[in-house]
Image (cartoon, helix red, strand yellow):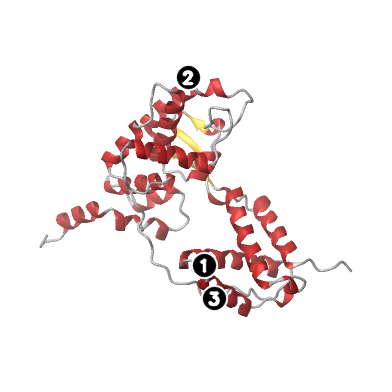
Amino acid sequence: MSPVPTLPELAEDFVSQLTVERGLSPHTCAAYRRDLEQFCGFLGPERHDAPGTLGDADIHRFLRHLRRQGLTPASIGRKLAALRTFGKFLCREGYLTTNPAATVDAPRTDRRVPGVLTREEVDALLQAPDSRDPNGIRDRAMLETLYCSGMRISEILAARLEDLDLEGGWLRCFGKGGKERPVTIGRHATEWLRRYLEHVRPQWDGAGAPELFLTDRGRPFSRSGFWRVVKKHAGAAGIVKNITPHTLRHTFATHLLDGGADLRTIQEMLGHAQIATTQIYTHVSTGRLHEAYKKAHPRA
Protein backbone atom coordinates (compact mmCIF):
# COMPACT_ATOMS: atom_id res chain seq x y z
CA MET A 1 0.00 0.00 0.00
CA SER A 2 1.50 3.31 -1.08
CA PRO A 3 1.91 6.02 1.57
CA VAL A 4 -0.58 8.89 1.71
CA PRO A 5 0.91 12.05 0.16
CA THR A 6 1.63 14.93 2.50
CA LEU A 7 -0.48 18.08 2.42
CA PRO A 8 2.25 20.11 0.62
CA GLU A 9 2.58 17.32 -1.97
CA LEU A 10 -1.17 17.33 -2.54
CA ALA A 11 -1.11 21.11 -2.87
CA GLU A 12 1.55 20.82 -5.58
CA ASP A 13 -0.48 18.12 -7.37
CA PHE A 14 -3.50 20.43 -7.22
CA VAL A 15 -1.62 23.38 -8.74
CA SER A 16 -0.22 21.15 -11.51
CA GLN A 17 -3.76 20.02 -12.29
CA LEU A 18 -4.89 23.64 -12.51
CA THR A 19 -2.21 24.29 -15.10
CA VAL A 20 -2.94 21.26 -17.28
CA GLU A 21 -6.70 20.70 -16.96
CA ARG A 22 -8.07 24.20 -16.44
CA GLY A 23 -5.52 26.09 -18.49
CA LEU A 24 -4.98 28.79 -15.89
CA SER A 25 -2.20 31.29 -16.49
CA PRO A 26 1.20 30.82 -14.80
CA HIS A 27 0.52 33.99 -12.79
CA THR A 28 -2.77 32.60 -11.42
CA CYS A 29 -1.22 29.21 -10.63
CA ALA A 30 1.67 30.92 -8.83
CA ALA A 31 -0.86 32.81 -6.67
CA TYR A 32 -2.60 29.52 -5.76
CA ARG A 33 0.76 27.99 -4.90
CA ARG A 34 1.74 30.91 -2.62
CA ASP A 35 -1.60 30.80 -0.80
CA LEU A 36 -1.41 27.05 -0.18
CA GLU A 37 2.24 27.21 0.87
CA GLN A 38 1.28 29.88 3.40
CA PHE A 39 -1.56 27.70 4.70
CA CYS A 40 0.66 24.62 5.02
CA GLY A 41 3.30 26.70 6.77
CA PHE A 42 0.69 27.98 9.21
CA LEU A 43 -0.47 24.43 10.05
CA GLY A 44 3.09 23.28 10.67
CA PRO A 45 4.92 20.04 9.75
CA GLU A 46 3.07 18.04 12.40
CA ARG A 47 -0.14 18.32 10.35
CA HIS A 48 1.35 17.67 6.93
CA ASP A 49 1.17 13.86 7.20
CA ALA A 50 -2.55 13.79 7.98
CA PRO A 51 -4.46 15.60 5.21
CA GLY A 52 -7.61 13.68 6.14
CA THR A 53 -7.82 15.50 9.49
CA LEU A 54 -8.24 18.92 7.89
CA GLY A 55 -11.36 20.67 9.23
CA ASP A 56 -13.17 23.98 9.21
CA ALA A 57 -11.56 24.89 12.55
CA ASP A 58 -8.19 24.94 10.74
CA ILE A 59 -9.59 27.32 8.14
CA HIS A 60 -11.05 29.64 10.80
CA ARG A 61 -7.74 29.69 12.71
CA PHE A 62 -5.86 30.54 9.51
CA LEU A 63 -8.21 33.41 8.68
CA ARG A 64 -7.86 34.83 12.21
CA HIS A 65 -4.09 34.63 11.77
CA LEU A 66 -4.33 36.57 8.49
CA ARG A 67 -6.49 39.25 10.13
CA ARG A 68 -3.95 39.67 12.93
CA GLN A 69 -1.28 40.12 10.25
CA GLY A 70 -3.25 43.07 8.90
CA LEU A 71 -4.34 41.61 5.57
CA THR A 72 -7.27 43.32 3.88
CA PRO A 73 -10.64 41.55 3.64
CA ALA A 74 -10.14 41.27 -0.13
CA SER A 75 -6.78 39.48 0.30
CA ILE A 76 -8.22 37.15 2.93
CA GLY A 77 -11.19 36.41 0.68
CA ARG A 78 -8.86 35.48 -2.17
CA LYS A 79 -6.93 33.06 0.03
CA LEU A 80 -10.19 31.51 1.26
CA ALA A 81 -11.29 31.04 -2.36
CA ALA A 82 -8.03 29.16 -3.03
CA LEU A 83 -8.65 26.92 -0.01
CA ARG A 84 -12.19 26.19 -1.16
CA THR A 85 -10.96 25.09 -4.56
CA PHE A 86 -8.22 23.00 -2.93
CA GLY A 87 -10.84 21.46 -0.61
CA LYS A 88 -12.91 20.39 -3.62
CA PHE A 89 -9.82 18.74 -5.06
CA LEU A 90 -9.13 16.83 -1.81
CA CYS A 91 -12.74 15.60 -1.73
CA ARG A 92 -12.67 14.56 -5.37
CA GLU A 93 -9.43 12.63 -4.82
CA GLY A 94 -10.86 10.86 -1.77
CA TYR A 95 -8.69 12.43 0.95
CA LEU A 96 -11.64 14.24 2.56
CA THR A 97 -15.37 13.55 2.71
CA THR A 98 -16.41 17.20 3.16
CA ASN A 99 -14.81 20.44 2.03
CA PRO A 100 -13.61 22.21 5.22
CA ALA A 101 -13.65 25.64 3.58
CA ALA A 102 -17.09 25.35 1.97
CA THR A 103 -19.07 26.66 4.96
CA VAL A 104 -16.58 29.33 6.05
CA ASP A 105 -17.88 32.82 5.28
CA ALA A 106 -15.67 35.21 3.37
CA PRO A 107 -15.00 38.57 5.07
CA ARG A 108 -17.22 41.41 3.90
CA THR A 109 -15.51 43.77 1.49
CA ASP A 110 -16.51 47.13 0.13
CA ARG A 111 -16.64 46.85 -3.64
CA ARG A 112 -14.05 49.33 -4.81
CA VAL A 113 -15.05 51.56 -7.66
CA PRO A 114 -12.23 51.34 -10.22
CA GLY A 115 -10.29 54.43 -11.17
CA VAL A 116 -10.71 55.61 -14.75
CA LEU A 117 -9.14 58.21 -17.02
CA THR A 118 -10.94 61.06 -18.71
CA ARG A 119 -10.94 61.22 -22.50
CA GLU A 120 -8.39 64.04 -22.30
CA GLU A 121 -6.11 61.94 -20.09
CA VAL A 122 -6.39 59.00 -22.48
CA ASP A 123 -5.43 61.23 -25.42
CA ALA A 124 -2.42 62.57 -23.49
CA LEU A 125 -1.31 59.06 -22.51
CA LEU A 126 -1.61 57.67 -26.04
CA GLN A 127 0.33 60.58 -27.51
CA ALA A 128 3.14 60.39 -24.92
CA PRO A 129 5.34 57.76 -26.67
CA ASP A 130 7.86 59.17 -29.16
CA SER A 131 6.63 58.00 -32.58
CA ARG A 132 10.10 58.63 -34.08
CA ASP A 133 11.60 55.93 -31.85
CA PRO A 134 11.06 52.15 -32.37
CA ASN A 135 10.27 51.64 -28.68
CA GLY A 136 7.85 54.54 -28.86
CA ILE A 137 6.02 53.03 -31.84
CA ARG A 138 5.71 49.71 -30.00
CA ASP A 139 4.54 51.42 -26.81
CA ARG A 140 1.92 53.41 -28.72
CA ALA A 141 0.69 50.20 -30.36
CA MET A 142 0.45 48.46 -26.97
CA LEU A 143 -1.37 51.34 -25.28
CA GLU A 144 -3.78 51.77 -28.19
CA THR A 145 -4.52 48.03 -28.17
CA LEU A 146 -5.08 48.01 -24.42
CA TYR A 147 -7.47 50.96 -24.48
CA CYS A 148 -9.29 49.90 -27.68
CA SER A 149 -9.80 46.27 -26.61
CA GLY A 150 -10.18 46.31 -22.82
CA MET A 151 -7.93 43.26 -22.54
CA ARG A 152 -6.37 42.17 -19.27
CA ILE A 153 -2.60 42.57 -18.98
CA SER A 154 -2.20 38.77 -18.91
CA GLU A 155 -4.22 38.50 -22.12
CA ILE A 156 -2.26 41.11 -24.04
CA LEU A 157 1.08 39.63 -22.93
CA ALA A 158 -0.06 36.18 -24.12
CA ALA A 159 -1.28 37.47 -27.51
CA ARG A 160 0.54 35.94 -30.47
CA LEU A 161 1.10 37.10 -34.01
CA GLU A 162 -1.16 34.34 -35.30
CA ASP A 163 -4.02 35.65 -33.13
CA LEU A 164 -4.11 38.99 -34.93
CA ASP A 165 -6.34 39.78 -37.91
CA LEU A 166 -5.34 43.29 -38.96
CA GLU A 167 -7.62 43.38 -42.00
CA GLY A 168 -10.66 42.42 -39.95
CA GLY A 169 -9.62 44.50 -36.94
CA TRP A 170 -9.80 41.53 -34.56
CA LEU A 171 -7.52 39.90 -32.01
CA ARG A 172 -8.15 36.42 -30.67
CA CYS A 173 -7.90 36.57 -26.90
CA PHE A 174 -7.58 33.81 -24.30
CA GLY A 175 -8.99 34.91 -20.96
CA LYS A 176 -9.30 33.36 -17.52
CA GLY A 177 -9.45 29.57 -17.61
CA GLY A 178 -8.26 29.58 -21.21
CA LYS A 179 -11.63 30.82 -22.49
CA GLU A 180 -11.34 32.17 -26.01
CA ARG A 181 -13.07 35.32 -27.21
CA PRO A 182 -12.54 37.65 -30.16
CA VAL A 183 -11.88 41.30 -29.31
CA THR A 184 -12.23 44.18 -31.72
CA ILE A 185 -9.28 46.57 -31.74
CA GLY A 186 -10.54 49.54 -33.74
CA ARG A 187 -8.90 51.58 -36.48
CA HIS A 188 -6.46 53.56 -34.30
CA ALA A 189 -4.97 50.44 -32.70
CA THR A 190 -4.92 48.73 -36.11
CA GLU A 191 -2.97 51.63 -37.61
CA TRP A 192 -0.31 51.59 -34.87
CA LEU A 193 -0.08 47.81 -34.85
CA ARG A 194 0.58 47.89 -38.58
CA ARG A 195 3.39 50.45 -38.12
CA TYR A 196 4.89 48.35 -35.34
CA LEU A 197 4.67 45.10 -37.33
CA GLU A 198 6.07 46.60 -40.53
CA HIS A 199 8.83 48.86 -39.22
CA VAL A 200 9.82 47.75 -35.70
CA ARG A 201 9.12 44.14 -34.81
CA PRO A 202 11.11 42.63 -37.74
CA GLN A 203 14.25 44.37 -36.42
CA TRP A 204 13.91 42.67 -33.03
CA ASP A 205 12.57 39.23 -33.87
CA GLY A 206 15.74 37.30 -34.58
CA ALA A 207 14.60 34.12 -32.85
CA GLY A 208 11.11 33.86 -34.36
CA ALA A 209 9.24 34.61 -31.13
CA PRO A 210 5.48 33.95 -31.42
CA GLU A 211 4.40 36.72 -29.04
CA LEU A 212 2.87 39.84 -30.57
CA PHE A 213 4.71 42.37 -28.40
CA LEU A 214 8.46 42.09 -27.89
CA THR A 215 11.14 44.06 -26.10
CA ASP A 216 13.93 45.64 -28.12
CA ARG A 217 15.98 42.53 -27.27
CA GLY A 218 13.45 40.28 -29.00
CA ARG A 219 12.02 38.84 -25.80
CA PRO A 220 8.40 38.61 -24.64
CA PHE A 221 7.26 41.32 -22.26
CA SER A 222 7.02 40.59 -18.54
CA ARG A 223 4.20 41.98 -16.38
CA SER A 224 6.63 44.30 -14.61
CA GLY A 225 8.04 45.49 -17.94
CA PHE A 226 4.58 46.32 -19.20
CA TRP A 227 3.76 48.17 -15.97
CA ARG A 228 6.90 50.26 -16.41
CA VAL A 229 5.82 51.25 -19.92
CA VAL A 230 2.41 52.43 -18.68
CA LYS A 231 3.88 54.29 -15.68
CA LYS A 232 6.56 55.95 -17.80
CA HIS A 233 4.13 57.38 -20.33
CA ALA A 234 1.55 58.31 -17.70
CA GLY A 235 4.23 60.42 -16.02
CA ALA A 236 5.24 61.99 -19.33
CA ALA A 237 1.58 62.80 -20.00
CA GLY A 238 1.28 64.60 -16.67
CA ILE A 239 -1.29 62.17 -15.27
CA VAL A 240 -1.17 62.37 -11.48
CA LYS A 241 -3.63 59.52 -10.85
CA ASN A 242 -2.27 56.14 -9.79
CA ILE A 243 -2.47 54.38 -13.14
CA THR A 244 -1.88 50.70 -13.93
CA PRO A 245 -2.49 48.62 -17.08
CA HIS A 246 -5.85 47.62 -15.55
CA THR A 247 -6.84 51.30 -15.41
CA LEU A 248 -7.13 51.26 -19.20
CA ARG A 249 -9.43 48.22 -19.00
CA HIS A 250 -11.67 50.09 -16.54
CA THR A 251 -11.54 53.17 -18.76
CA PHE A 252 -12.47 51.13 -21.84
CA ALA A 253 -15.60 49.79 -20.11
CA THR A 254 -16.63 53.15 -18.66
CA HIS A 255 -16.24 55.01 -21.95
CA LEU A 256 -18.30 52.32 -23.71
CA LEU A 257 -21.04 52.74 -21.12
CA ASP A 258 -20.91 56.52 -21.53
CA GLY A 259 -21.24 56.03 -25.28
CA GLY A 260 -24.45 54.04 -24.92
CA ALA A 261 -23.25 50.41 -24.98
CA ASP A 262 -25.36 48.05 -22.87
CA LEU A 263 -23.95 46.07 -19.95
CA ARG A 264 -24.40 42.67 -21.61
CA THR A 265 -22.32 43.73 -24.59
CA ILE A 266 -19.61 45.15 -22.33
CA GLN A 267 -19.68 41.93 -20.30
CA GLU A 268 -18.91 39.93 -23.46
CA MET A 269 -16.17 42.33 -24.53
CA LEU A 270 -14.46 42.14 -21.13
CA GLY A 271 -14.84 38.37 -20.84
CA HIS A 272 -16.67 38.59 -17.50
CA ALA A 273 -18.34 35.35 -16.46
CA GLN A 274 -20.92 37.19 -14.31
CA ILE A 275 -22.86 40.35 -15.15
CA ALA A 276 -22.43 41.45 -11.50
CA THR A 277 -18.72 42.00 -12.20
CA THR A 278 -19.57 44.34 -15.06
CA GLN A 279 -22.21 46.24 -13.07
CA ILE A 280 -19.54 48.00 -11.03
CA TYR A 281 -19.02 50.32 -14.00
CA THR A 282 -22.49 51.79 -13.50
CA HIS A 283 -21.05 53.36 -10.31
CA VAL A 284 -18.27 54.96 -12.32
CA SER A 285 -20.26 56.18 -15.29
CA THR A 286 -22.26 58.82 -13.44
CA GLY A 287 -22.51 60.99 -16.55
CA ARG A 288 -24.65 58.41 -18.30
CA LEU A 289 -26.82 57.90 -15.21
CA HIS A 290 -27.49 61.63 -14.91
CA GLU A 291 -28.30 61.84 -18.61
CA ALA A 292 -30.73 58.91 -18.37
CA TYR A 293 -32.36 60.53 -15.33
CA LYS A 294 -32.81 63.86 -17.11
CA LYS A 295 -34.38 62.16 -20.13
CA ALA A 296 -36.69 59.80 -18.24
CA HIS A 297 -37.83 61.46 -15.01
CA PRO A 298 -40.67 64.01 -15.13
CA ARG A 299 -39.16 66.12 -12.33
CA ALA A 300 -35.58 66.13 -13.62
As helix, strand or loop, the secondary structure at mark 2 comes to helix
Which is more toward the observer, 253 or 232?
232
Residue at point 55% right, 30% down? Answer: 161
Q: Residue at x 54, y 34 (%)?
A: 163
Quote the CA–CA distance across marks 2 and 3. 56 Å
**Which label sits in the foreground, 1 or 3?**
3
Q: Would you say residue 25 is visible in this rendering?
A: no
Q: CA distance from mark 1 to mark 2?
A: 47 Å
Q: Tag 1: residue type? A: Ile
* Coordinates of residue 259 in the picture (x, y in percent): 27, 45
The location of residue 17, given as percent across then percent down, is 69, 55
Q: Which residue is drawn at the image coordinates 45% and 37% (left, top)?
A: 229
Alpha-carbon distance for marks 1 and 3? 10 Å
Q: Tag 3's secondary structure?
A: helix
Q: Residue 35 occupies which quadrant of the picture? A: bottom right
Circle 1: element type: helix
Of residues 187 and 43, the one nearer the viewer is 43
**109 relative position to 161: left or right:** left
- For residue 249, above or below residue 210: below
Q: Give the residue type that dot 2 points to.
A: His
Labelled disc at residue 64:
3
Q: Which residue is mark 1?
A: 76
Please give the label number shown on residue 199: 2
